[in-house]
């Protein structure tokens, strides 16, 4: 089973209608002249972001979307009817890429945001437009232009404030259950999470953030190995990463420090800037060890990694020490918001001084 966070579709706008060749024929008006109307414009294809959608799975069943052709012009200078547009709903966070050129056409990051992906053709001119002093009866009309057709790739990137990183079975699904109302599948085998899960953590009224449980990464993920390959892009939008590591793996040969470094290598390979994001270390499954041994292992891991960012020792299944992390995360976002407001106020003050000066 695969989470459909990527889809490729063909969008075809409608052709413009042809202009009409017609002449006015009425009683007592023998030389009425040309009166052919213009053709209607073809319909266009738009994408619209919809917060009620979470995946691109619907595009498995329909991959070709065509807008309506413009109607041909008619006599008596009657314009053809324009073709109807096609509006395709996609989840918020969808990036749109031209398959042929590999260029980004747009990025739909807010509910209701609208993006034109295929422009409808223009209607042709009727023969009334070709009348001149030397050609009183033009038998010529414009042909409607073809609508755009292109293949586009849709890539869904989750819009979350916090991303959970970690190898399979690090306890990410259990952690997100402990701190939010999300209910991802939890089991004792790798790759339990096949879908990224979003949970809202509400600290108090008007103070909340979104946390994403990203499927487990393995070594080689940036090159396509494991389930995490296609989900590395989701981490790019988060503002803070919580790196979960299993402090008490069942396999004695597993090295927690090695797992942390392996994921760092995958992040670096996918996008070096991702390692510049704030990343806090969360050492999980402390309940499987005596308290003193768990603390000793945690401190030893921090020393081995030379970890400079905040770190925490938790038991996600027992919800021990998980909520204090959420309070610190909210404080982190509050400080970011305060700094942004202060910077905006300073910029406004400088702009006003320039106007006065």
Image: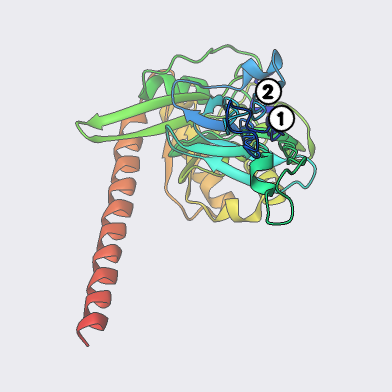
Secondary structure beneath dot 1 equals strand
Q: Check if mark 2's residue and mark 1's residue have beta carbons within 8 Å.
A: yes
Q: Residue beneath label 1, please? A: 12
Residue 117 x/y as whole percent = 63, 38
Secondary structure beneath dot 2 equals strand
Residue 336 x/y as whole percent = 33, 53
Badge 1 density bin: few <14, some 14–19, many ≥20, Cα 10 Å:
many
Asked which quadrant contains residue 204, the reply is top left
Asked which quadrant contains residue 138, the reply is top right
Asked which quadrant contains residue 311, the reply is top left
Query: For this view, does 282 lie left or right of residue 116?
Result: left
Q: What residue is at 57 percent from the left and 24 percent from the top?
A: 84
Q: Residue beneath label 2, please? A: 65
Query: For this view, does 342 lie left or right of residue 247?
Result: left
On residue 351, the disc is none
Quarter containing the N terminus: top right
Q: Considering depth in this image, is 151 or 75 the residue closer to the camera? A: 75
First of labels 2, 1 by sequence position: 1
Q: Considering depth in this image, is 289 or 33 the residue closer to the camera? A: 33
Residue 29 x/y as whole percent = 59, 33
Q: Is residue 286 above or below residue 343?
A: above
Badge 2 density bin: few <14, some 14–19, many ≥20, Cα 10 Å:
some
């Amino acid at each position: 089973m695969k989470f459909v966070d990527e889809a490729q579709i063909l969008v075809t706008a409608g052709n413009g209608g042809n202009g009409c060749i017609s002449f006015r024929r009425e009683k007592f008006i023998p030389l009425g002249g040309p009166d052919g109307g213009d053709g209607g414009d073809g319909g266009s294809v738009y994408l619209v972001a919809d917060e009620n959608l979470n995946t691109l799975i619907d595009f498995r069943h329909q991959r070709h979307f065509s807008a309506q052709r413009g109607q041909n012009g008619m006599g008596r200078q009657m314009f053809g009817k324009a073709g109807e547009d096609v509006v395709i709903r996609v989840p918020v966070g969808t990036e749109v890429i031209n398959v042929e050129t590999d260029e980004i056409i747009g990025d739909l990051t807010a509910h209701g945001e609208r993006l034109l992906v295929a422009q409808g053709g223009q209607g042709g001119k009727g023969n009334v437009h070709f009348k001149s002093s030397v050609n009183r009866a033009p038998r010529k009309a414009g042909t409607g232009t073809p609508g755009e057709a292109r293949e586009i790739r849709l890539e869904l990137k989750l819009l979350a404030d916090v991303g959970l990183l970690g190898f399979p079975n690090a306890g990410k699904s259990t952690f997100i259950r402990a701190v939010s109302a999300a209910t991802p599948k939890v089991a004792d085998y790798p790759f339990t999470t096949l879908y990224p899960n979003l949970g809202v953590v509400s600290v108090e009224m008007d103070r909340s953030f979104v946390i994403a449980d990203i499927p487990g990464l393995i070594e080689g993920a940036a090159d396509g190995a494991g389930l995490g390959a296609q989900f590395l892009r989701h981490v790019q939008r988060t503002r803070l990463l919580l790196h979960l590591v299993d402090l008490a793996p069942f396999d004695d040969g597993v090295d927690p420090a090695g797992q942390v470094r392996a994921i760092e290598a995958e992040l670096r390979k996918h996008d070096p800037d991702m390692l510049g994001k704030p990343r806090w270390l969360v050492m999980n499954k402390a309940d499987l060890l005596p308290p003193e041994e768990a603390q000793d292992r945690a401190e030893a891991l921090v020393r081995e990694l030379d970890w400079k960012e905040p770190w925490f020792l938790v038991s996600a299944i027992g919800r021990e020490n998980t909520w204090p992390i959420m309070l610190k995360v909210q404080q982190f976002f509050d400080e970011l918001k305060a700094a942004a407001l202060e910077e905006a106020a300073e910029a406004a003050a400088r702009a006003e001084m320039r106007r006065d000066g």
